[in-house]
Image (cartoon, grey):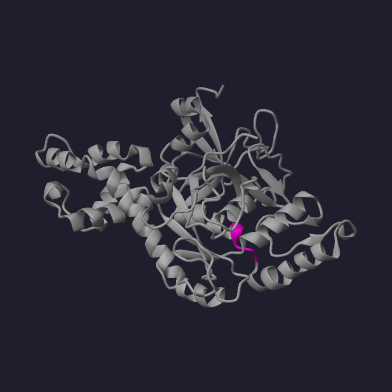
Amino acid sequence: MQRSYSKLLGIVGKPNTGKSTFFSAATMAPAEIANYPFTTIKPNRGIGYVRTPCIHEEFNVKDTPVNSLCLDGVRLIPVEFIDCAGLVPGAWEGRGLGNQFLDEIRKADALVHIVDASGGTDCEGRLCNLGEHDPLEDIKFLEREITMWMANILKKDWPKIARTAESDTKDLYPMLEERLSGLAIKRPQIIQAVKKAELNADKAASWSEDEFLRFVDCLRQISKPMLIAANKMDLPPSEQNLQKLMKTNYVVVACCAEAELALRRAAEKQLIDYKPGDCNFRMLKPEQMSQAQIKALETIREKILLKAGSTGVQDAINMAYFKLLNMITVYPVEDIEHLSDHNGRVLPDAYLVPYGTTAREFAYIIHTELGEGFLYAVDAREKKRVGEDYILKDRDVISIVSTRKRA
């Protein structure tokens, strides 16, 4: 299966919050899981899925997916995750191999912060009594760690960059973009951060230490948007802590990664019928399960699925891509009448692209040659031509007409 164009999602947090369980549930990758700090030493990479209703029913056709999956009308589009090892206070200074771990998320476009909503792990990730630790402290800690890590990267060359920009020999923004290219930070994000910090780019050399850090903190918020996955919602203190987390400025999703992992493993063995993000499941082979296994699954159904509507893992993934990253789903086809590619496969591909993507930019995403030879596109719903500047809409079905064909 070819992987669709997408963004990289970083899974972050302190040790022992359920990060690796979340990652394994999302990707079914065999990440090592244990309840002690630094279980994850090397970052895990894996492929998960964004869930969206497939459009084949709207067009009354039977689809033949290639770069994604379609299960009972649900299109699952592959996306890439990276599971960063647990961070501890002082990570940006190298404590706990923190610099190394932080460096692994430099290419992440958005972050899912796994927070122990039960308050059962202290600031170092060590087990403590349930409700003893305030999860709000974990948010403040991670914000500071990432901000200081980014500031440390920039600070070495900052005096030279600021002085050069102020002397008009070069503009501040392209210089910063070049310096921060390794962090997947783009010029528009830098411009937005300066504006949000209420600073004057022309006077960068005169910024105080506090102003510099304010700029970097704004840049972190813009370039690495973060969602809070309030994990371990099956434990008693979590409900109360969730209300506190919901009052922050973050998108917060209640999660139980352990339950999701159990459901996906059971589905993988074809013991139950369950798709990521479903609000329920159906037993398929109860005779092949022990009474303990059946009881555990029924507990998940009653205490989590029927109560909350889902385990929250798939919701967190979807929210990260559709809300934080503002992505939309687009279906490219070649034959506009049959909604197929040159092999006759119907609605074969589903792409996640940023909102604001134009028809020509989308052509380049599919294949460079399609973009270079772009003539026009055809909207399958309206059956009309659109130009290169046409802004794609969510769930568009588009045929690209080009002088060149992809190899």
Where is residue 85 drawn, in percent x and y?
A: 49, 49
Where is residue 190 drawn, in percent x and y?
A: 28, 47
Query: With respect to residue 179, does 210 lie above or below?
Result: below
Is 311 in the magenta?
yes
Q: Is residue 351 visible?
A: no
Where is residue 238 drawn, in percent x and y?
A: 55, 73
* Residue located at (66% from left, 73% from top): 307
Where, quadrant-wise, is the N terminus in this rendering?
A: top right
Secondary structure predominantly adopted by residues drawn in magenta = loop
Quarter of the image where one finds residue 199: bottom left
Where, quadrant-wise, is the C terminus in this rendering?
A: top right
Relative horizontal placement of residue 326, taking residue 22 as reference (left or right): left
Outermost residue, bottom side: 240
Query: With respect to residue 351, does 257 lie above or below?
Result: below
Which of 23/31 is in front? 31
Outermost residue, right side: 287
Quarter of the image where one finds residue 234: bottom right
Relative horizontal placement of residue 32, taking residue 87 as reference (left or right): right
Span colored in magenta: 310-314
* Residue located at (37% from left, 64% from top): 140
Which of 212/251 is in front? 212
Which of 65/257 is in front? 257
Where is residue 65 drawn, in percent x and y?
A: 68, 40
